């Protein structure tokens, strides 16, 4: 079973957008939730980031100038994640959404959030 982790902070990121932008965000999240889309397929569809954001992926909409940054937790990260939060044992895959926002600010926001 796959779980998409969207924190309250990320939800606030998403709330700033208008109707069409929110529809696109929902479509991306629905795509990530759909277990018919394997993790390998997700990794192929969305561009991996480099540098200090290596291991993270982005979904982007050029027309809107919006990015969604997320990571797919590996086995080691899953163990740490499950120790912090009580979860249903049926969950085997976690995709953690880190931030959503405009191109101009998103990468600074992500860098701050992953350092916490």
Image (cartoon, helix red, strand yellow):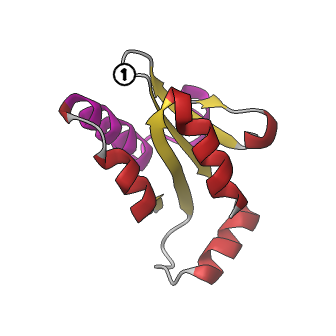
Q: Does the magenta run of residues contain 32?
A: yes
User: Residue placed at 43% from the left, 22% from the top?
Assistant: 65
Residue segment shown in magenta: 20-45
In this view of the protein, can residue 73 be seen by the observer?
no
User: Residue placed at 38% from the left, 44% from the top?
Assistant: 29
User: Which residue carries the number 1 mark?
Assistant: 64
In this view of the protein, can residue 70 be seen by the observer?
yes
Image coords of residue 79 (percent x, y): 69, 74
Answer with left or right where residue 106 lies relative to residue 79. Answer: left
Up the image or down, 68 lies above or below 78; here it is: above
The picture quadrant where one finds residue 23 is top left
Which residue is the extreme one toward the left? Answer: 19
Answer with left or right where residue 110 lies relative to residue 21. Answer: right
In depth, the one of 67 and 88 nearer the eye is: 67
Image coords of residue 104 (percent x, y): 54, 28
Image coords of residue 57 (percent x, y): 61, 37
Secondary structure under badge 1? loop
Image coords of residue 44 (percent x, y): 60, 28
The picture quadrant where one finds residue 85 is bottom right
Answer with left or right where residue 6 lies relative to residue 21. Answer: right
Up the image or down, 85 lies above or below 110; here it is: below
Q: Quadrant of the C terminus?
A: bottom right
In depth, the one of 36 and 4 nearer the eye is: 4
Secondary structure predominantly adopted by residues drawn in magenta: helix
- The number of numbered discs placed on residues in the rendered structure image is 1
Up the image or down, 79 lies above or below 114; here it is: below
Up the image or down, 116 lies above or below 18; here it is: below
User: Residue placed at 60% from the left, 77% from the top?
Assistant: 82
User: Residue placed at 79% from the left, 41% from the top?
Assistant: 52
Q: Residues within 10 Å of mark 1 (few under 14, many from 20)?
A: some
């Amino acid at each position: 079973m796959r779980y998409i982790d969207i924190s309250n902070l990320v939800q606030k990121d998403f709330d700033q957008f208008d109707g069409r932008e929110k529809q696109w965000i929902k479509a991306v999240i629905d795509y990530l939730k759909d277990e018919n889309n394997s993790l390998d397929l997700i990794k192929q569809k969305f561009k991996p980031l480099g540098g200090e954001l290596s291991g993270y992926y982005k979904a982007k909409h050029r027309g809107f100038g919006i990015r969604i940054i997320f990571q797919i937790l590996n086995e080691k990260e899953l163990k740490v994640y499950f120790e912090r939060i009580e979860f249903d044992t049926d969950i085997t895959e976690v995709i953690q959404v880190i931030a959503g926002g405009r191109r101009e600010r998103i990468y600074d926001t992500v860098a701050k959030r992953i350092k916490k």
